[in-house]
Image: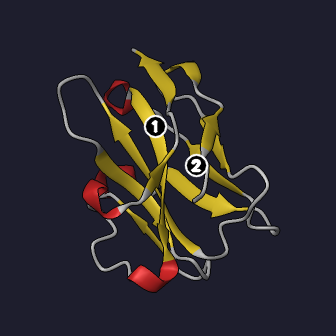
């Protein structure tokens, strides 16, 4: 069992930058494949970015490539999503998800594939 807590959301103007964080209190992500998803009202949670449990591989949804960067700290206890050149369509609740590494990660962009979720943090981009 792992608890995930997101933070850092807020209101930013289009073209601006914002970073959100995900922590696992008392633990690390070293045994988990991790991902960021986002969700807007009435829509399914959609994949944004993922980091493999080794930290060696990262994946991004096409619309955020070159604008968003997912990373973890050296202690693998905090995951970040740095968002630049934000657009109004990036407005959503952002969630971090975790899947235990031994269970594989072939469907990393599928929100049903994750075992643990945080409560989410709201990111609002004004035009």
Which image quarter is the N terminus in? bottom right
Residue that appears at 39% across and 50% down: 64
- 10 Å crowding of disc 1: few (<14), some (14-19), many (20+): many
The x, y position of residue 62, in whole percent, is 30, 58
Q: Nearer the viewer, residue 16 or 44?
A: 44
Residue that appears at 33% across and 53% down: 47
What mark, if any, has residue 94 been given in the picture?
1
Left or right: where 86 falls relative to 11: left
The x, y position of residue 81, in whole percent, is 58, 49
Classify residue 29 by image quadrant.
bottom right
Mark 2 vs mark 1: which is more N-terminal? 2
Residue that appears at 56% across and 71% down: 32
List the single residue furthest toward the front.
1
Question: Which residue is denoted by mark 2 in the rendering?
Answer: 81
Left or right: where 55 falls relative to 27: left
* Distance from the alpha carbon under mark 2 to that under mark 1: 10 Å
The x, y position of residue 12, in whole percent, is 55, 20
Classify residue 56 by image quadrant.
bottom right
């Amino acid at each position: 069992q792992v608890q995930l807590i997101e933070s850092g959301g807020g209101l930013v103007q289009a073209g601006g930058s914002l970073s959100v964080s995900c922590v696992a209190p008392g633990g690390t992500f070293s045994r988990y494949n991790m991902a960021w998803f986002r969700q807007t009202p009435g829509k399914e949670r959609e994949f944004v970015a993922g980091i493999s449990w080794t930290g060696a591989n990262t994946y991004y949804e096409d619309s955020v490539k070159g604008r968003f960067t997912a990373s973890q700290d050296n202690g693998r206890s905090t995951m970040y999503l740095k968002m630049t050149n934000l657009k109004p369509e990036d407005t959503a609740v952002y969630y971090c998800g975790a899947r235990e590494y031994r269970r594989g990660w072939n469907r990393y962009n599928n929100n049903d594939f994750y075992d643990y979720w945080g409560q989410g943090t709201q990111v609002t981009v004004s035009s």
